[in-house]
Image: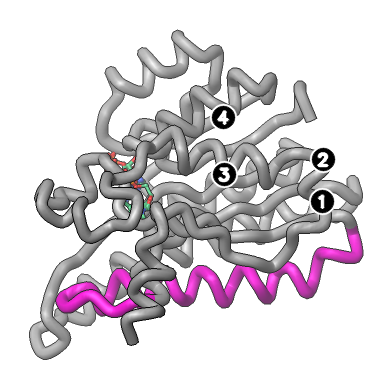
């Protein structure tokens, strides 16, 4: 609802900045975390009126410290958008690097959402949204660690739903396919493999998240909403 406080992780990324802009436009009081680009964070905060919070999600102690502040903050929604990639064939995966990726993509979110859920369930309303990935459900060579982290994110969110739905809180995943940001690096030719014939826009992912935050999305719970121009359905049909 307009005026409610919303937390977005990774606010200076491609999808993250679109999220901050969209949710601010929808009237939420937006706070976002950022890691490496102070100038971009400052500019985004100035443009949208959002609060910028420096936080490296790979730093467990920093995440713990931040989570400890959430008991008093009463966020209506937490949107975990930050995500890292680690491309390696399964035979060459470095488990330390895989664990570091899981810290950013999953464990930081477990800590932050876990802390934010107490005030949400007490208020009997709230929204948990994680930005997953189509890769969680479809195989892409070299993507095993990333795909596993996003699949774990989906399982976590689904299970959170079972714990909090009765208290007016929803927990869902938005799973982008190929979105035109610096993370995607998709060669133009690959766009032709997508039924929509183009990469997605960060704003289109933000729109799906914005929908899940609305009051009239209260009955959408424990699910994964793909935003992929039809790619997932096409790959499933090709099996
Ligand atoms: N683009 C796609 O095609 C696509 C497809 C499926 C899923 N996704 C998901 O969409 C989300 C947003 O990705 P994007 O496309 O917008 O890519 P992006 O522009 O690279 O953004 C990634 C964001 O995650 C943040 N991040 C990474 N490691 C972090 C850390 N250790 N601590 C704090 N923040 C960290 C980045 O901050 P820094 O810039 O400071 O590192 C950045 O804000 C991710 O979860 C990604 O997995 C994207």
Q: Within the image, what quadrant is residue 69 found in?
A: top right
Q: How many marks?
A: 4
Q: What residue do we see at 69% from left, 60% from top?
A: 171
Separation (CA) of disc 2 from disc 4: 20 Å
Q: What residue would you read off at disc 1?
A: 218
Q: Is residue 145 magenta?
A: yes
Q: What residue do we see at 9% from left, 84% from top?
A: 92
Q: Quadrant of the C terminus?
A: bottom left
Closer to the chain start, of discs 2 and 3, is 3
Q: Specify the principal SS of the magenta part.
A: helix
Instruction: Say left or right for 50 vs 125.
Output: left
Q: Is residue 19 magenta?
A: no
Q: Is mark 3 within 8 Å of ligand 1?
A: no
Q: Indicate which disc residue 208 carries.
A: 3
Q: Residue furthest top?
A: 46
The secondary structure type at the circle numbered 4 is: strand
Q: What residue would you read off at disc 4?
A: 31
Closer to the chain start, of discs 3 and 4, is 4
Q: What residue do we see at 27% from left, 48% from top?
A: 197
- Asked whether the beta carbons under mark 1 and mark 2 sit within 8 Å of each other, the answer is yes
Q: Looking at the picture, does residue 25 appear above or below residue 198?
A: above
Separation (CA) of disc 1 from disc 4: 22 Å
| Magenta region, residue range | 138-167
Crowding near pointer 1: few (<14 within 10 Å), some, many (20+)? some
Separation (CA) of disc 3 from disc 4: 19 Å
- Can you see residue 187? yes
Question: x%, y% of residue 4?
Answer: 76, 29
């Amino acid at each position: 609802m307009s005026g409610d406080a919303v937390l977005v992780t990774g606010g200076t990324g491609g999808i993250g900045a679109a999220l901050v802009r969209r949710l601010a436009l929808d009237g939420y009081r937006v706070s976002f975390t950022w890691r490496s680009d102070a100038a971009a964070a400052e500019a985004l905060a100035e443009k949208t009126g959002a609060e910028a919070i420096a936080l490296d999600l790979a730093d467990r102690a920093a995440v713990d410290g931040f989570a400890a502040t959430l008991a008093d903050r009463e966020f209506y929604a937490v949107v975990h958008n930050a995500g890292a990639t680690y491309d390696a064939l399964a035979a060459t995966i470095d488990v330390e690097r895989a664990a570091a990726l899981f810290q950013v993509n999953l464990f930081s979110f477990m800590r932050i959402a876990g802390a934010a859920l107490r005030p949400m369930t007490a208020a009997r309303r709230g929204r948990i949204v994680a930005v997953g990935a189509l890769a969680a459900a479809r195989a892409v060579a070299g993507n095993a660690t990333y795909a596993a982290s996003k699949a774990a994110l989906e399982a976590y969110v689904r299970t959170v739903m079972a714990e909090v739905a009765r208290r007016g809180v929803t927990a869902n995943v938005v799973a982008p396919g190929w979105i035109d940001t610096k993370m995607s690096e998709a060669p133009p030719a690959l766009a032709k493999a997508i039924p929509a014939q183009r990469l997605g826009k960060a704003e289109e992912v933000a729109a799906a998240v914005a929908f899940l935050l609305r009051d009239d999305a209260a009955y959408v719970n424990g699910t994964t909403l793909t935003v992929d121009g039809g790619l997932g359905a096409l790959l499933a049909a090709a099996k």
